[in-house]
Amino acid sequence: MLWSLAYADPIYPVPDHNEWPRHDTFVLPPVVKRRRGRKKLNRLPSIGEFSRR
């Protein structure tokens, strides 16, 4: 009866987003630089296929 332990505590509804606490700090996404050209694929060569390196 592990599921009864998981649901033993009451689950409260989430308030509306207008009632959420306000913070002064903002988290911005990291700066992503796009590389030029076609993306290289890293794959395993199949049997009988040789690499050009």
Image (spheres, helix red, strand yellow):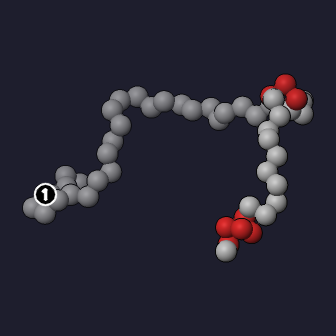
Mark yes or no: residue 23 visible: no
Crowding at mark 1 (Cα within 10 Å: few <14, some 14-19, many 20+) = few
Residue 44 location, x and y as percent?
A: 26, 58
Relative placement, left or right, of 6 versus 51 is right
The kind of residue tagged 1 is Glu
Residue at screen point 67% across, 72% down: 2
Of all residues, the one furthest to the bottom in this rendering is: 1
**Residue for point 9% across, 61% down:** 48
Across and down, in percent, residue 9 comes to 82, 60
Q: Is residue 39 above or below residue 51?
A: above
Residue 37's spot in the image, x, y percent? Answer: 35, 29
Does 8 sit left or right of 29 as displayed?
A: right
Asked if residue 35 is positioned above or below residue 10 in the image, the reply reads: above
Q: Nearer the viewer, residue 43 or 13?
A: 13
Which residue lies at the image location 90% right of the left edge and 33% below the top edge?
21
* Residue found at the very far top of the displayed protein: 18
Image quadrant in which you'd find residue 47: bottom left
> Circle 1 — which element?
loop
Disc tally is 1
Quarter of the image for the C terminus: give it: bottom left
The residue closer to the viewer here, 35 or 41, is 41
Whether residue 26 is visible to the viewer of this picture, yes or no, is yes
Quadrant housing the N terminus: bottom right
Where does residue 31 sit, x and y in percent of width and height? 62, 32
Is residue 19 placed above or below 49 in the rendered structure? above
Question: Where on the picture, by quarter, is residue 39?
Answer: top left
Determine the residue positioned at 21% across, 57% down.
Answer: 45
Is 38 drawn above or below residue 1 in the view shown?
Answer: above
Query: Which image quadrant for residue 13?
Result: top right
Residue topped by disc 1: 49
